[in-house]
Image (cartoon, helix red, strand yellow):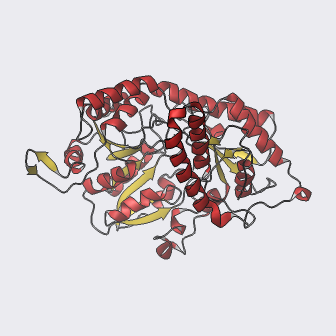
Amino acid sequence: MQQANHNCTRLVVGKPNIMDKKGFLRDMDEILDTMIFTNLGPFATKLEAKVCSYLEVKHAFAVSNATVGLAMMLRASNLRAGGEVILPAYTFIATAHAVLECNLKPVFCDCDPESHLIGIKEVSACISDKTVAILAVNLWGLACDVEGLQSFAKKKQVALLFDSAHSFGARASNGKFVGNFGDAEVFSMHATKLFNSFEGGLITTNDDSLALKLAPMRNFGITGQDEVSCWGSNYKLSEVHAAFALRQLENIGKLIETYTGNAKLYSKILEEKSVSGLQSWNKRYLDHEGCTHSYLCLEVEPSFPLTRDQVIFRLREKNIFAKRYFFPGLHKCQPYLKTSENLILPVTDRLCQEVLVLPTGSNVGEIDILRVVDALKELSEWQSSDEQQLGPDGSAVLVDYSHIQEKITYVKGLKSNYEELAGACDKDLLFLEDRLSCLTSDRNP
């Protein structure tokens, strides 16, 4: 099992932002005192209203997560069963799964090598008389060519939907917030996102008729007392999740400023230290006022002495947990591989081999960024004579269980500081250590 240096702070991609802990704990007291836990309570409905106000969009629906939001959006669009939906192969698997869940056929397209997004060029290569919708994705906090795709979709008479899970707070080139384009859009409020709760999703639309379909769908199709008017399920957002999201929304300006500031700092230090063989995605968009830089992305070029996966392995030894994203591409994942095995998507394939996502967010400061860049600088000077074991198969990226070790350290601290908790802590430690042992036993030599 690979050993990390636990003397250094563990840096991870997507560590949750907590912007107002005291305010949230007051909200928790209110939720417990009123005993309104769910069923579109006051925090959830307030969140929807605040999102509409911030994004300047007519309708917002808070749901349990973005994946169900995608499926709801597709169902509400009344697309022909079996119809084809064009989407990028370079995105998270949930996008394709939602399409399949709605009895539609995913058709994967390539993406732009600079932005990692899709546009008219990529969609045009896949459009056919079987196409019923385009499901574009706004990645890394950057909007794709939303206006161009709107014109294209209107001309082709197909629905246009957006998976904007990464991009709450981003603006298109015309200055409008993402959330106002196509027929509808979906955002994620997963713990790892810039605008986060514990879990959660949002659907936004300016289409009144679509909003009428979406509203009851998340609550079993219920439209009144003992009245069920359509199909639906339990996709509601709990009050706890909504309350946390509201506290985050009140600080959304600070969050965006933090992420954009980190992107600028990473770019500056990478340049100052002359780290060769790495291309910064964020540097390309530092002057784009609408980009939130919700992720910090590098491309590890072939000229770098180590592969991207080897870089990940070596960074973990320094307690820096960088990640690859969307590997190996949706067209190479089950259950889509069989129908897409002959699909040639060169940009997607390259990005799946080269993209390296680094820690950022409110938990990452200048000293952390310096530490990461120093580690990358050291790796950029790697010599072939320094070759050592790079992983079980030379470059494997194993599942990261370091969060369990961090929890173990936390519980040991509780036990040490609070004698009355010793018994409960011992039980927790036994469970956690056994869990970690089971998960990692197959990795030990």
Whole-percent x and y of residue 108?
48, 63
The picture quadrant where one finds residue 10 is top right
Whole-percent x and y of residue 192?
50, 42
Q: Is residue 126 visible?
A: no
Q: Quadrant of the C terminus?
A: bottom right
Whole-percent x and y of residue 13?
59, 44
Residue visible at 53% across and 53% down in the picture: 431
Residue visible at 57% across and 32% down in the picture: 259
Residue visible at 40% across and 23% down in the picture: 23
Q: How many marks?
A: 0
Residue sitting at the far left: 226
Q: Is residue 240 left or right of residue 401?
A: left
Comparing 394 with 330, the one in front is 394
Residue visible at 34% across and 53% down in the picture: 68
Q: Is residue 350 left or right of residue 253?
A: right
Whole-percent x and y of residue 245?
39, 33
Q: Quadrant of the N terminus?
A: bottom right
Q: Is residue 233 above or below residue 7?
A: below
Q: Is residue 346 visible?
A: yes
Comparing 359 with 56, the one in front is 359
The picture quadrant where one finds residue 378 is top right
